[in-house]
Image (cartoon, rainbow, N blue to C red):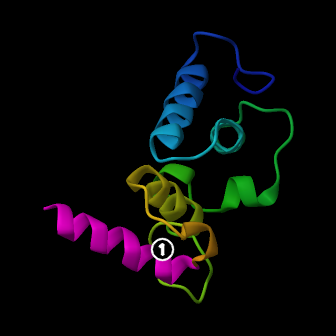
Amino acid sequence: MPPRGVKPGTKRARQYEHIKESQRERGASTGRAEEIAARTVNKERARSGQSRTRSRTSTKDISSGRRGGQRSGRRSAPRGRTRDQLYNEAQQMGIEGRSRMNKAQLQRAVDGRKRSRS
């Protein structure tokens, strides 16, 4: 269900569903996927003047579409998939001990499993 103020069948409603499905395919939980989709749609609505209120960061910051994951993970860590994304991949691959692994360990385990399969 799109955020309040977004009518069904509009461009923003379709955008919300597209982002939500994309996040689900990447391994995010349903709740997290809905949160990301709603935040993105709300930000785009604010940027284009479709919402009543908007924050300075919504209007002055780089657009969500252009940013595309540039800020995933911590500042000091290399860019790329987040720990949660790596964990979900490891879960799908059946990698044991994943819950005790940190991001770097998950990265090595997932990449190692992918190389051994090809």
Q: Quadrant of residue 49?
A: top right
Task: Please give left or right for residue 65 compared with residue 9 in the image.
Answer: left
Magenta residues, start to end: 102-118
Query: In the image, residue 71 lies at what x, y percent?
Result: 57, 70
Q: Image quadrant for the C terminus? A: bottom left
Q: Give the residue drawn at x 44%, y 56%.
A: 89
Residue 79 visible somewhere in the drawing:
no
Check disc 1 and report the residue beneath it: 106
Question: Which of the 4 image quadrants contains residue 116?
Answer: bottom left
Q: Does 35 sit above or below residue 76? A: above
* Above or below, 38 relative to 2: below
Q: How many marks?
A: 1
At 49% from the left and 83% from the top, the residue drawn is 104
Tell me the SS state at disc 1: helix
Residue type, label 1: Leu
* Left or right for 30, reference 89: right
